[in-house]
Amino acid sequence: MTRTEINNKSSPIVIEKYLPLPKKETREFWTDNRIHHIRHLASTGKPLMVWDRCKSETSRILDRVFFLREIEDGGEGDLVSNPLDVVEVSSKICYGRLELTYPLYLGDMSFGALSGIPNIAIARAADITGTLAGIGEGGLHPEVGKCKRIAVQWASARFGLDLDVLRRGMAVVIKIGQGAKPGIGGHLPGVKVVDIISQTRRIPVGVDAISPAPHHDIYSIEDLEQRIFALKEATGKPVLVKVAATNYIPYIASGVARMGADGIIIDGQGAGTGAAPSVVRDNIGIPVELAVASADEMLRREGLREGFTIIAAGRVSSAEDAAKLTALGADIASIGTAALIAMGCIMIHKCHLGFCPAVITNKIAENPKKILSLETATRWVVNLIEGWSAELKLILERLGLKSIEELKGRRDLLVGLGLSDSSLEVLGIRGVSSNS
């Protein structure tokens, strides 16, 4: 046996520890401090802070929105190791048809975009914690299909979908758009379409998996209604519609609710790690905080809000982000990148090329040199959810609330610091000066 053959048969290195963070050449939203915070939660499952200390590092609108209580606390809060058990964070969504132990949706990341083990870890973590995980549009990984708390995605290309797949899990998601690239379909480069991806997506090996921008059977709101009811009838599951956050989101949310969907996933600007053209990524779409507030206001005005679910996605980085989005009108928050960071992502931004030092989004190889530990990755995501929820309980306790339900739509608890009048109007909150 040659040395090459021996090396090819050697066991891969199993990654069970976090890699050091590389020096960043440009400023980005996911700062080192945000990553270290997520790593703490993922490693321990314990809260680190009450109020998010990373807000000053970036300038998005949500970072300029504060709970009035936080200002009164001076940005500090009493951190206890075991949040009060009387604070309840479970939530019912989709007209009460689904109950979540923790108010989190683990956002739609496909098998192919992720390298398999992360997909399994996320789905298993959802089962363990009583949350809900979206499988994305890449078809159903066999091990993911064994999990119960998953949402199957009906995207424009319908990769790997049949009636059996649609009936798995707890819900169906019709993906109309995504925050990384509003108005553009998905794209998995051919270099990542290896044999197992080919089998799952039912496409040739080495061929780009391109989703068309529109669904070719959904060109009107009436078409959407037909698909919603067809999927409900075929599966018996609640149906959510995923859209990108754009200026028309209030009217879109109203239409989705009127057409019989059980909820809407609003994916804000900056979401996702896909291979999105920079001109689209940076200039199309609006922040999720503006989209959620305006959609919630429209639905309430039209009498469509009761029981209908709003899931807020896109750069949700902390429990405080989730709490503020809930106060602005969301029912639950979605985390995607945060879950990847919990599993070791170091923000190299090479996901679409098949190169990932943390082996989360790498091209799947027959004889890999490194693999991610499934047990460790699952534990990290479970810990993230539990630590995140512990911080959310601390925030609710500081606000004098006993449940996440009491926080929904409570814009009166929020203030904006240094925001324009137009932003304050859309958010439905009052502004304060830095001297207040």
Image: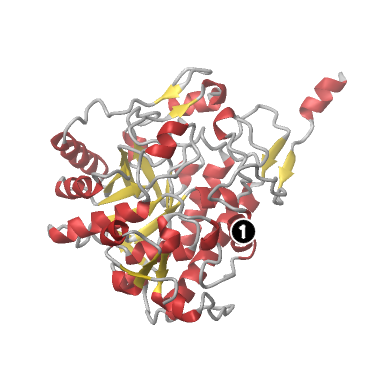
**Residue at x 47% of width, y 20% of height:** 208
Q: Is residue 124 above or below residue 372?
A: below
Which quarter of the image is occupied by the N terminus?
A: top right
| Residue 355 quadrant | top right
**Residue at x 64% of width, y 39% of height:** 359
The secondary element bearing badge 1 is classed as helix
Q: Is residue 80 above or below residue 334?
A: below
Residue 410 makes an appearance in the image: no
**Residue at x 58% of width, y 28% of height:** 353
Q: How many marks?
A: 1
Measured from the top left, where is residue 100 in percent x and y?
38, 62
Viewer-closest of 135 and 394: 394
Q: Is residue 373 above or below residue 92?
A: above
Viewer-closest of 168 and 238: 238
Measured from the top left, where is residue 174 in percent x and y?
30, 40
Residue 362 makes an appearance in the image: yes
89 on left or right of 374: left
- Amino acid at pointer 1: Asn
Can you identify the residue that label 1 sits on?
33
| Residue 269 quadrant | top left
State how the image is colored.
Answer: secondary structure
Number of residues whose C-alpha sits closer than 10 Å to that of mark 1, classed few (under 14), some (14–19) or many (20 or more): few
Measured from the top left, where is residue 301 in percent x and y?
14, 60
Measured from the top left, where is residue 325 in percent x and y?
37, 61
Which quarter of the image is occupied by the C terminus?
A: bottom left
